[in-house]
Image (cartoon, grey):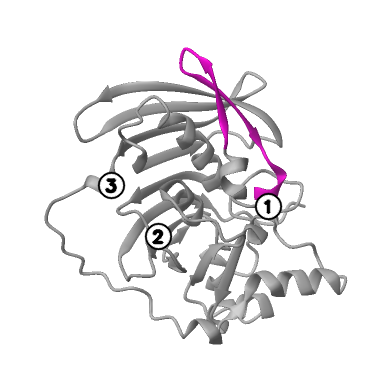
Amino acid sequence: MDVDRFAQDTAVEALGEGRYHGRIDPGWAVIDGAAPNGGYLMALAARAMRDPVPQHPDPVTLTAHFLAPPVVGDVEVDVEVLRSGRRHSTLAATVSQAGRPKVRLLGAFGDLASAEGPTRVDRQPPELPPLDTCIDFTAEHERRAEAGGYPPPPIAMRFDHRMPSAVLGWTRGEPSGRGHIGGYLRWRDGAPMDTLGLLVVADCYPPAVFDAGLGDVAWVPTIELTVQVRKRPAPGYLAGWFTTEAVTDGYLEEDGQVWDADGDLVVLSRQLALAARPRA
């Protein structure tokens, strides 16, 4: 298995004048052969965005609007430094393919290793069962595919996912009706997790709305995603928890939180997405 596949598949090359070349890899799609995951696109763009501000390597907050789904292949990332200060740099970027914009981003970058100030976290990590009692979600997908089932989502194979059985009832036709999903995860190839990787973690779980029991939601395309990175993660499994509590006329929110192995909050996220019905 490739070492540090994430770094390889989000690599960019500077072309000059704020332009970068990257390549979308097929291994980050939600459905085999379909468009790449939104968090992966954010991470690829963020790698280009932080290049002109090396003193600020961490995406403290990054918002992406997804204009149209790109395909596997070459992309260009145009980066604009809007302001560079002592603590933060603010940048905008556009991911384009064949001359057409696909994603627009705006973010503030900083150096979380040197961040200091008051700390108070009233949130609590998700109450997950012990790791060794959780389902190996990644291996389960592989077993089903080998038995003649559907191929696993390519992005699922990038992670070592361990999920409680209670949040996977929807896979057995028994959703809880609460719109929750979460579990433990890390890169499957054992690579260290950094703050760019956290952008993918914030968007790598099956949609929480699948657990809501609506019945006819086939896919959940993201319109806008904002990820706040609060801290560089400690080594070990992360714990993620994602919820959808309001679906209105086909629009839904998904709120996420991610905690590291030391029990520290490292990510908060929110996205607006569509609950799309099967196409006729």
Instruction: Determine whether the residue tagged by mark 3 lies in a helix, strand or loop.
Output: helix
Q: Nearer the viewer, mark 1 or mark 3?
A: 1
Q: Is residue 44 magenta?
A: no
Q: Which mark is residue 112?
A: 3
Secondary structure found at label 1: loop
Q: Nearer the viewer, mark 3 or mark 2?
A: 3
Residue 213 visible in rendering: no
Report the side of 43 relative to 268 (left or right).
right
> At label 3, which amino acid type do we have?
Leu
Tell me how far mark 1 sits from mark 3, CA to CA: 28 Å
At 50% from the left edge and 42% from the top edge, which residue is drawn?
A: 43
Locate residue 133 relative to residue 152 in the image: left or right.
Answer: left
Residue at 30% across, 66% down: 264
Q: Which residue position is annotated with label 1?
A: 2
Q: Mark 1 or 2, which is nearer the eye?
A: 1
Q: Are marks 3 and 2 in contact (CB under 8 Å)?
A: no
Q: Which residue is mark 2?
A: 255
Q: Earlier in the sequence, mark 3 or mark 2?
A: 3
Image quadrant in which you'd find residue 24: top right
In the image, residue 60 sits, relative to residue 165, either above or below, namely above
Residue sitting nearer the eye, 245 or 71: 71
Q: Measured along the vertical axis of the image, is residue 251 above or below residue 258?
A: above
Magenta extent:
11-30
The span from disc 1 to disc 2 (Cα, nearest Å) is: 31 Å
| 25 within the magenta span | yes
Q: Amino acid at mark 1?
A: Asp
Name the outermost residue toward the top: 17
Residue 63: in sight, yes or no?
yes
Tag 1 near tag 2, CB within 8 Å: no
